[in-house]
Image (tube, helix red, strand yellow):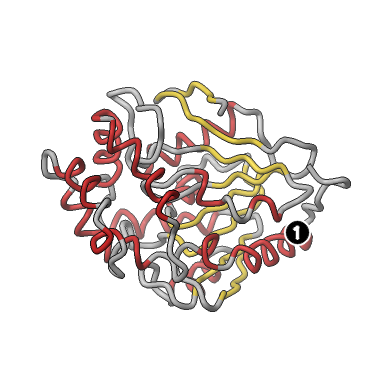
Amino acid sequence: MPGVALSSGTIDYQDTGGGGPVLVFAHGMPMNETQWRKVVPLLDGYRCVLPTLPLGGHRRPMNPDADLSQRGVALLLGEFVERLGLDQVTLVLNDWGGGQFLVSEGRAQRVARLVLVACEAFDNFPPGPARAMAAMCRVPGAVWLLTRLMRVPAFRDHRNGYGGMSLRGVPDDVMADWFAPATRSRAIRRDLAKFATSAPDRRTLLAWSERLRDFEGPVLVVWAAEDRLMPREHGPRLAELYPRGRLVEIADSSTLVPEDQPERLAEVLTAFLRQTGAEPAAGGH
């Protein structure tokens, strides 16, 4: 897997290549690019770029002084897009919603469109059920303990934890891969703890959200009907916040829509891209 050296460390990424419009996919905590493994093959004619962000599932630790706050990781994502020379990208988020802060920080010049798939928004950083885990990460040694607990099915599959993120269930080997870096590396655990405990207070989050109105590009908000982490009302509220927002709800899915409804997600994403001028390249990737 290629990597690109950024100010905070080296970011691994996958790139399907080709001459089609560029889609940049971000992932959740502590996941990696495999969160999109069911969707990317359905997007023929688009160049899909998938960075592995330092949210705990990354395989290379960041620099010890790296800013891995919500804002810091958003800016790192923007730096990644710039360093690869990508432009007019469609930024696709699921679970982690912090990529929106590129807009609130005035750093979204290379982003033409946003696709917000059942992600954190407004003051829901981290989502309610995940707040106990975030608080736990403040305790020395707790991230190590968490990686061990994730091996216990009753803990891993609990409906108020990762088990509630997918109605279908994330395969054990995929979830094991997400937690493997933090399991074996103290530096990765350090990075995970820095990010997990970084959410600002409610007033700050809502102030940042108000700045999202400045984004002039089209925005597709895809919300899951059976989501336990992202409030149902946040879908229409986000679509209304963005001047060119539109909402699609997907039934029979929880937060990880790419896991539960990949075909439907690819369908609505492709329709949105075509309707907003991002036609796929002839002949595919």
| SS for callout 1 | loop
Q: Nearer the viewer, residue 139 or 149?
A: 149
Toward the right, the furthest residue is 282
Is residue 251 shown above or below 215? Answer: below
Residue 128 visible here: no
Report the label total.
Answer: 1
| Residue at (61, 60) in percent of width and height | 219
Residue that appears at 48% across and 72% down = 237
Residue sitting nearer the eye, 144 or 224: 144
Q: Position of residue 121 (x, y in %)?
A: 41, 61
**Residue 161 drawn at (x, y percent):** 29, 63
- Assign the C terminus to one quadrant of the image: top right
Q: Nearer the viewer, residue 60 or 78?
A: 60
Q: According to the image, label 1 marks what residue?
A: 276
Residue 84 as seen in the image, left or right of residue 282: left
Where's the N terminus, which quadrant?
Answer: top right
Q: Residues within 10 Å of mark 1 (few under 14, many from 20)?
A: some
State the image quarter where residue 249 is shown: bottom right
- Using the rendered view, name the quadrant where residue 182 is placed: top left
Identify the residue shown where x is 72% and y is 60%: 270
Q: Residue furthest left?
A: 140
156 with respect to 135 (left or right)? right
Q: Amino acid at mark 1?
A: Thr
Q: Nearer the viewer, residue 119 or 36?
A: 36
Q: Position of residue 158 (x, y in %)?
A: 28, 66
Q: Residue at x 29, y 59 (%)?
A: 156
The x, y position of residue 209, in whole percent, is 42, 58
Residue 234 seen by the camera: yes
Relative vertical location of residue 221 with respect to residue 17 in this rendering, above or below: below
Q: Is 24 located above or below residue 9 in the figure?
A: below
